Amino acid sequence: MKTIDEINEKIKQGKALVVTAEEIIDLVKEKGVKKATQEVDVVTTGTFGPMCSSGAYFNIGHSKPRIKLGGGRTYLNDVLAYPGLAAVDLFLGANALPDDDPRNRVHPGEFNYGGGNVIEELVAGKDIRLTATAYGTDCYPRKKLETWINIKDLNEVVLFNIRNAYQNYNVAVNLSDKTIYTYMGVLKPHLGNANYCSAGQLSPLQNDPHYKTIGIGTKIFLGGGVGYVAWQGTQHNPNVLRSENGVPKRGAGTLAVIGDLKQMSPKWLVGTSMFGYGCTITVGVGVPIPILSEEILRYTAVTDDDIWAPIVDYSDAYPNQKPDILGEVSYAQLKSGSIAVQGKKVPTGSLSSYLRAVEIANILKEWILSGQFLLTEPVALLPGVESGVTFKPLKERPLET
Amino acid sequence: MAISKRIVLHFPRRLVEQPVIYRLVKDYNLEFNILKASITAEPEEEGLMVLELKGEQEEYDNGINFLLKTGVKIQSLSQDFTRNEERCTHCGACITICPPGAFELDPETRQVKFVDEKCVACGLCIKACPPRAMEVHF
C-alpha cells in the first residue's frame, strides 16, 4: 500500500515510475500484479472526443458607463451566450448557435459554427465580437454594447464542463431504411455502419471503474492545460450493468471538470460540427491514477477485450427511449474495423480519437516525470454503486388535465 | 503502358456546348468515367467535370494536350480534395462514410490516412467530418 503523499515525494525526487494505461497492460503481463504494484506509482489515462455539456464562463469587466447584461441578450460572434447570472458574467455553452443559423430547417443542417467554435477561437487568442442589449438601470444605465474582446483582456475565463469523459458509451447503428444524422455521426441505413465513442482501455473512468481514486479535487489534464474534477458529471450513473471485472457495460459514470481556459490550447479544444445534429466541442481529458494498491493496479490493466459496449439502434430505440439493445461488443472488436450485428458485418467508425488519447496520456506522463505535476488527494469521492444514485428519465406531468 | 488518372476539368463558358469529351474517345482512344459534372456560378460561370481517364500513356498525354489547347484547365483530383492536417483529429468518423474507402485506419498507429488517389470527389466527407478538416477547392 502506498499513499498519494509518498507518490508525490517520489515525483519530486524524480524517482516515480509513471506509465500510460496502454503501457501498463504489457507491464502487468510481464511482471505480474504484485511486482507491478510495487514498481509503478502512477498510470496516466486520456480521452479526446466530442463532449457535450461543455462550456465556459467568464467575466468581461465593466464598461464605462456600466451595463447590466443579466436579463438582456448577449452574443459572441453571433452565438448566443447566457448573461443571466449578473452584470458582466457570461456562460457560453458548446451547443449554442447563432440566432440566424437555419438549424435543421433544411434537413440535415450543416451546423458549421457554434459555441464550441467560439471557445476554440477564444482559447486560440482570436478577437471575438461581443454584441449585447440590456434594459438599463440607474446604476447600470447603458443599453447597448458592441466590442471586440480577447481572452488576454478578460478577467476570469474558466472552462466548466458539467459532463465529460463518459465512462462508457453506446455503439450507434441505424436499422431504418434511410440515412440518419445523429450526435453519433451519420448513420447509414440497414446497418450500413456502426459508430462508437470511447478511448476504451485508455479512458479515465474505465481505469478506475469504482471511482476509488478519481474524486472531487483530482488534478487532471484538461484542454491542454491543468484542470480539476469539480464534481460527478450530470447523468452520473454508477448503478449500471457491470462485467465481473467491475467495468460498466453501459454509459455509467461521468465527470464535471473545471480549469483556467487561459492556459489551455486550441489543439485540445476543437469546435465540432455534427451534421444534422448541432455544434459541440471535442475535449481532451487525461486523469492520473495513483497506484495505491493491487486492486487499483488491476483495474488500470484493463484491455479493450474486457470492455463491452451496447449496440443501440438510433433510428428507433434511442429516440424513443426503448431499452432494447442489439447486442454487446468489446472495444477490441470495434477497433478491428467491423462488428457483427444481426448476422451482418458492419464497418465501424470512431468519433473519439485514440491517437490523440495516447498523446494525452503521454503528455500527462511527461508532466509528472518532470516534477511539475503533483497528484492531489480527492476531497470527496464520486458516488459509487453503494450510493444508490441512478439516472432517472423525465417524469412528465401534464400542465392541464 | 496503360494508365488511369482522376482529373478535374474546368471548361470555360465558350466550350460548354462543345463535345470535348467525345473527341477524347474518338481521337485518342481514351476510356472515361464521369465522377461528377456540374455548372458552377462561382467564382465564374464554367463547366466542371471530374473524370477518371484511362488509356495508353502516349494517347493519354496527347489527349491531355488536346484538352489544354481547347482552353480546358486541368488539375489532378488530389489537389482539389485536401485534408487540413491541423484540424484533423484522426477520430475516424470519415472512414465508414467514404464510398470508395479513401480513408484508412492504420491499426498500429491509429492514424487515419487520406488516400487521395481513391477519392471520387463525392464530397460526403466534407460535412460528415466533425472538426470540418476536409476541404474542397474546385
Image (spheres, rainbow, N blue to C red):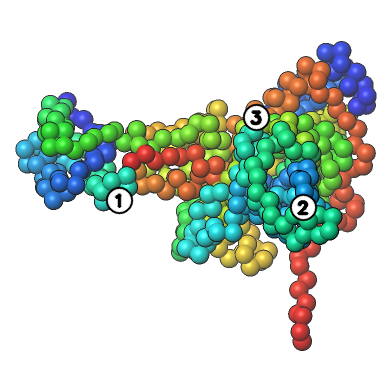
Give me the disc on residue A67. 2
Instruction: Residue A265: give x, y in percent of width and height.
Output: 66, 32
- Which residue shows up at 34% across the image and 33% down it? B79
Is tag 2's residue or tag 3's residue first in the polypeptide sequence? Answer: 2
Between disc 1 and disc 2, the foreground one is 2
Assess disc 1: are there few (<14), some (14-19) or many (≥20) residues with their C-alpha within 10 Å of its C-alpha: few
* Labels 1 and 2 within one chain: no
**Quadrant of image for the C terminus of chain B:** top left
Q: Is residue A48 visible?
A: no
Helix, strand or loop at label 2? It is loop
- Mark 1 residue type: Ala
Q: CA distance from mark 2 to mark 3?
A: 46 Å
Q: Which chain is indicated by disc 2?
A: A
- Mark 3 residue type: Val
Residue in front for this viewpoint, B108 or A244: B108
Instruction: Residue A294: give x, y in percent of width and height.
Output: 86, 30
**Quadrant of image for the N terminus of chain B:** top left
- Which residue shows up at 81% across the image and 18% down it? A371
Helix, strand or loop at label 3? It is helix
Give me the disc on residue A358. 3
Q: CA distance from mark 1 to mark 3?
A: 45 Å
Q: CA distance from mark 1 to mark 2?
A: 46 Å
Up-down: is A35 above or below A131? above
Assess disc 2: are there few (<14), some (14-19) or many (≥20) residues with their C-alpha within 10 Å of its C-alpha: many
Q: Which chain is indicated by disc 3?
A: A
- Which residue shows up at 66% across the image and 66% down it? A322
Residue in front for this viewpoint, A283 or A202: A283
Tell me if A163 is positioned left or right of A340 in this view: right
Q: Which chain is indicated by disc 1?
A: B
Instruction: Residue A154: give x, y in percent of width and height.
Output: 74, 38
Tell me if A394 is positioned left or right of B133 in this view: right
Give me the disc on residue B41. 1
